[in-house]
Amino acid sequence: MSAILDDMLWMLLPLAALVAVAVGGSALSDTSFVLATVAMSVMMSVGIAGRAKVRRGMFLASCVVPESAWYWRLRGSFLIWLLAVLRAVPLATVLVVALARAEHPRTLSAFIVSAPLLVLLWHFWRARLRRHVQARVLQDVALRLAQAAVWAMLVIGLTFAALYATYPDLGDGSLGQAVRHEAARQDAASGLLLGLMQLAAAKDAVSWWLGQQFIHAIVDPAFRLTAWAIVLATDALVVWSYLVFCSSVLYLVRWRGFHPPTRDEAKP
Amino acid sequence: MTLTIPGPAMSLRLLLLAAGWVLLLVVADPRLAPSTLRPAPPVEVVVDGRQFSVSPSVAGSAARLSADRLEVGRAEAQAHVRELVGRELDRVFDSVHERLPAYADWFYSLGGEYARLSWVVLGAMGKLDGDPLAARAAEIVFDGALFEQRIERVFGAVNEGLALRIEATGRDWLAEVVAVFERQDRPRRAPGPQPTIALDDVLGDFVGSGSGAFAGRLTASSAASAGVVVGPLVARVAARPTVSGGGRAVAARTAARTLGKSGTAGSGAVLGCGVTGPAALPCALAVGSAAWLATDWLLLQADEWVHRDALIADWERRLEALRADLEAVLLAYYEAQVDAWYDDVSGRVERTFSPVAGSFGR
């Protein structure tokens, strides 16, 4: 119970940072935007690389003889970090831009509400899987399951909310007009951020325009609802970025738990 | 399952957690905050083709500024109208004043005298329709229909000046309001349900075709007013009896003339026509007529010498009265037009700012 509360308290810090980006995002200067993205990327890279190392360690322990030269070669260091950075930078950028654009507070509220849920589910799966999963990957596997469950819940919830939201009527214009209209509605102090926000807005405009042009032709209401849900489920990547960020925070907070001493190391 | 009471450390953590989460939620979604703590959503303002996102209090201060600016604009327009009307009427009446000596010349000419005499006779016979003396006076002093055209030009000049003034007021207002919004503009989040204030519609009343429409409206109504107003006023001024004109003076001169002529005709016969026979009658008539005209001329000269300045002074007073009447009519007309226009625009501005009516309260 104490550990859960501690983890939830730790989660307040990154959440506060996300809220700060969401509230003042469009007022960020170029430098502030880059700093925020870099900080988030570093945090995510640490989490992604650390957890990748856990999985790599498990693979090496089960598949490669420790005395082999390949055990050392495959331990993963530079490449894991490089791949982690390559994943973290776009995810962090997507998250910062999405938060700065946040048209409706429902996304941010959903993120805040889901953070303790992620912690609870993580601890739940850890307790349930303790007797079935090796201690070396227990934290990572539990976190993956919790992450997947929260991701599914958030995507479904946000998509459902998006179905009942109001959108600009783009049905009468061309796709180009729709894209230009949505891009023109964006505003940010940072030119870099503005450009990215306009890209994201253009992506939204394409989705909405396609939906408004073609989906009404689908007769069956169930199929139409499904089609709309697919069009509107564009938040999936944002939700995933957010969960990677939260998982990275939990990884940093519980670093030792992710790297338990092996039996050999534990022996006196 | 056992229920354990959390210790002080745990309670503190729970309290911190709850407080932190509530705080984050409230910051993230202000709708969750108590209404007193909830920041009002920004107001989108569209003015001069530009879009601003400002707080309701800024929009409210812009609304107050607009209302104040419109009141100042109204006062300035009224003052400008007074100045324009005064200047234009001065210009018109200066030329009218310059025609008074011509009127006096006609008045104290033999032609004028005999015309008045004939009008007296015809009037006594009931053969006159209207006041020919007033008509003649109006024709000479006011240069016939030219005066009405000049007053129409006064309307035109005032209309144009007023339209320019209103356009300038609109541009001043626009500059001040945009400056307020530029100072307070905050980066726009994506448009949401926040109220939008579109000032461009109101702005159109001030500038470009808007001020042209106002001028057009003035022109249409003032063109009609010129004819309606000027004719009766001029007729009234010209019909007033003059100090040395009118039937009384003519009758006095006629009596003097009669007395003089009975003597001069006889003396003409005696002094001028020493002939006898058939030529005596024409000669007597010629000498008598010459004496008649000479007497008239002398009497008129005497009358002019005595009364000309008084006649001109009288007409000066009439023209001043006419000018005052015309100025009153014009000012009443323009003040009503300006008031109606500013009432209309103020109402539209107030309605435009109605989404921030709470902040608009004066």
Image: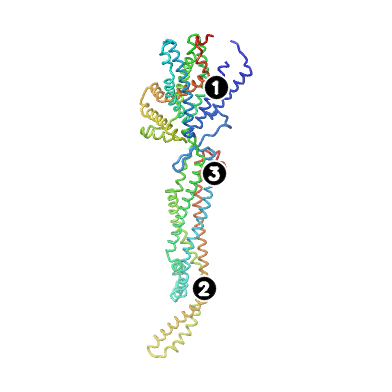
Q: Are marks 1 and 2 in contact (CB under 8 Å)?
A: no
Question: Which quadrant of the rendered structure holds the N terminus of chain B?
Answer: top right
Q: Position of residue B94 (x, y in %)?
A: 48, 65
Q: Position of residue B34 (x, y in %)?
A: 58, 29
Kindly report which numbered mark, 1 or 2, lies closer to the viewer in this rendering: 1
Q: Chain of mark 3?
A: B
Mark 1 nearby-residue class (10 Å; few <14, some 14–19, many ≥20): some
Whether residue A128 is situated above or below residue A156 in the rendered picture:
above
Residue sitting at x 49%, y 63%: B90
Q: Are marks 3 and 2 in contact (CB under 8 Å)?
A: no
- For label 3, the residue is B64
Q: Chain of mark 1?
A: A
Q: Chain of mark 2?
A: B
Residue sitting at x 50%, y 19%: A251
Q: Nearer the viewer, residue A15 or B116?
A: A15
User: Is B183 displayed left or right of A223 in the figure?
Assistant: right
Mark-to-mark CA distance, 3 and 2 = 58 Å
